[in-house]
Image (cartoon, rainbow, N blue to C red):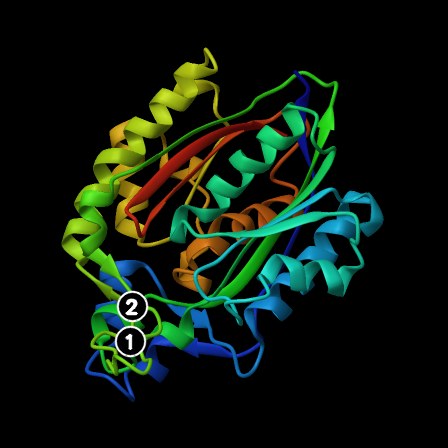
Amino acid sequence: MLNIKIAGMGSYLPDNIVTNDDLAKIVDTSDEWIKSRTGISERRISKGEGTTYMSVMAAKEAIAKAGVSSETIDLIIVSTITQDHFCPSTACQVQEAIGADKAMCFDLSAACSGFVFGLSTAAQYIKTGMCKTALVIGAELLSKLTNWEDRSTCVLLGDGAGAAIIQATEEKGYFDFLCRCDGSKGKYLLCESRPLKNIFVNKDSEHPYIEMDGREIYKFACSVVPEAIEKAVEKCRLKIEDIKYFVLHHANERIIKSVAKRLNVPLQKCYMNIQSYGNTSSASIPIALTEMFNKGLLKKGDTIVIAGFGGGLTYGAGVITI
């Protein structure tokens, strides 16, 4: 079997910055309340950019960083729960925009675990020889699913996109994943789709926005994420101490701190930018990875762990050699 490498990363974030003080003007909250419970100071909120546009911008940066042409991309996977259209898929729209006319394209729905699931899926296509170069995107326009009167959720969420070009390589390294779901807990993070309205039924949506039981999600993440990471690392016959960085989904600073404590790793090894962008769901990990590459934090030969958790409930971890 071939191995896989990350050839290039890219991201896109709207210019519009919304601070905690801005939110305090529309809901009963404060900068201190939000920071102390989430670690978030500000987030980016779209003033017109759609999920497809953000995906395309992130993809173009990843393609440029990888030094590949769009025509060589065999596969495009976009992880999102906030697509601009039910049909065509966001991935097909990205394909048109970047000129990757030879690629198979589809969207994937795994909420905040989506980028991890997307990389894992693309890796199987490459390892089995079905493609050589894949574009994996995590993109969310969460502001359109946000109830701006609910302070328990509106203070958490932001918009953005991140993308990765992955390729087959003969170089030794790790690109292995462990992905799982627990559908019995799906009720703890919900967002209804378009209601059924036809000649027989005329139903209004009762819950048009994201609804979350924060306490249950916290308990779930703090339990399954360390376990998934340990199993993924063990699967590669490595030890936690061999990992240079842990890049977790940015849902809440307290969750990241709890996972670090459970794994007995220094918090400095858990890269965080949640203070600037909030929870961008499936975009959070690729946005963080792009920053890390741009800052020179990731060097060739480094082994990192990525881990996501979210609606479904879904969770997963991957061990990747840069």
For residue 262, above or below residue 10: above
Q: Nearer the viewer, residue 113 or 33?
A: 113
Q: Nearer the viewer, residue 54 or 241?
A: 54
Q: Amino acid at mark 2?
A: Glu
- Marks 1/2 in contact by CB < 8 Å: the verdict is yes
Pointer 1: residues within 10 angstroms few (<14), some, or many (20+)?
some
Spatial CA distance of label 1 from label 2 is 6 Å
For residue 127, above or below residue 73: above
Residue 192, disc: 2
For residue 218, above or below residue 46: above
Examine the rendering and report whether any part of residue 207 can be seen: yes
Q: Residue furthest top?
A: 237
Task: Examine the image and state in which quarter residue 101 appears.
Answer: bottom right
Disc nearer the start of the sequence (1/2): 2
Write the residue at 29% across / 42% down.
257
Q: Nearer the viewer, residue 322 or 139?
A: 139
Quadrant position of the N terminus in the picture: top right
Question: Looking at the picture, how far across and down is residue 221, in whole percent?
Answer: 26, 42
For residue 177, above or below residue 58: above
Question: Element under label 1?
Answer: loop
Write the residue at 66% across / 64% down.
93
The residue tagged 1 is 208
Quadrant position of the C terminus in the picture: top right
Question: Element under label 2?
Answer: loop
